Image: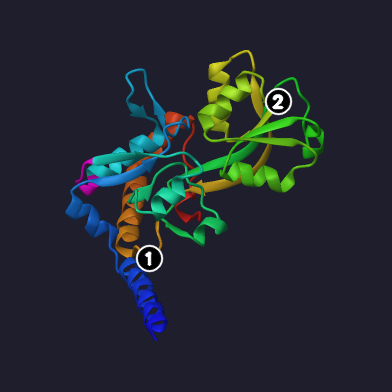
Amino acid sequence: MKRRHILAATALAILGTFASHAQADALADIQARKKVLIALDLGSPPFGMIDANMQPYGSDVEVAKLLAEQLGQPLDIVQVTSPNRIPYLQTGKADMVIASLSVTDERKRVIDYSKPYGVIQSVVAAPAGQTIKTMADLKGKRIGTTRGSVNDKEVTKVNDGSEIVRYDDDATLVTALVSGQVDVMATSPQIMKAANERNPASKFEVKMVLKVFPYAIGIRKGEAALKQRLDKFVDENLATGKLNEIYKKYNGVDLPADIATRN
């Protein structure tokens, strides 16, 4: 009987945990705490970087600052890497993730998203002198990518005899590429640009586009009030042009005209 009571009590505790999570209201928590905890990847140019004065900057940093300002709360940056963006969100270390978080069906099973505020390509990039038209042309080469990213997922799906080398963040990937540790990278055009800026002689260029993803603000499942507020933020700042201004500043092009309808 005692064992049965213990098991029943444990089950009730677990149910209580789920119930309390279901009733959680992250937007109310932000307001009560009087600051917003936003997960940002500061090793992913041009989305998040650290300047010479050790201050964060980049397109996602500017979006996060704009959101915090419009929420009327101070911004508290929770620094993450590509692999731990979602775990930090799910364990409550951050209220949301603004870190070039691509919208994928796989991620939709574990988190919710705001409306998209940008797009990112997953590409294969290599030096200009190399002729690469298909994945078969990469047999025997070392392909660098960022662990846990959509680029990792997409290149793994189509890999045809290459060695995939995974790094924990984009900054380390760029270092590996310019130092010759890998021959090719599966990444975004923005990260490729950062590699070229680090080593202009390398002249990396896009060889293949694997996929185009919208990216959005990630939140925990069931946060209806927060999602509504974030969707309003995206709608209003797309309408005023502020999000396009930030995107163009760091990417050199305008947002796609249909960005609001992508998901």
Tell me the SS state at disc 1. loop
Q: Quadrant of residue 185?
A: top right
Is-magenta flag for residue 72?
yes
Looking at the image, the residue that sits furthest to the top is 201
The coloring applied to the image is rainbow
Q: CA distance from mark 2 to mark 1?
A: 43 Å
Q: Earlier in the sequence, mark 2 or mark 1?
A: 2
Image coords of residue 197 (percent x, y): 53, 18
Quadrant holding the N terminus = bottom left
Q: Quadrant of residue 121?
A: top right
Bounds of the magenta segment: 70-74
Tell me the SS state at disc 2. loop
Position above or below: 247 against 14: above
Q: Closer to the camera, 45 or 207?
A: 45
Position above or below: 176 against 226: above
Q: Which amino acid is tagged 2?
A: Asp
Instruction: Give the labeled residue for mark 1.
Output: 222
Q: Closer to the camera, 119 or 218?
A: 218
Q: Which amino acid is tagged 1?
A: Gly
Instruction: Give the labeled residue for mark 2.
Output: 183
Image coords of residue 109 (percent x, y): 51, 62
Position above or below: 142 against 198: below
Position above or below: 9 against 179: below
Label 1: few (<14), some (14–19) or many (≥20) C-alpha neighbours in 10 Å: some
Magenta span: chief secondary structure = loop
Left or right position of 242 against 140:
left
Q: Which mark is residue 196?
A: none
Image coords of residue 94 (percent x, y): 34, 48
Is-magenta flag for residue 112?
no
Image coords of residue 231 (percent x, y): 35, 56
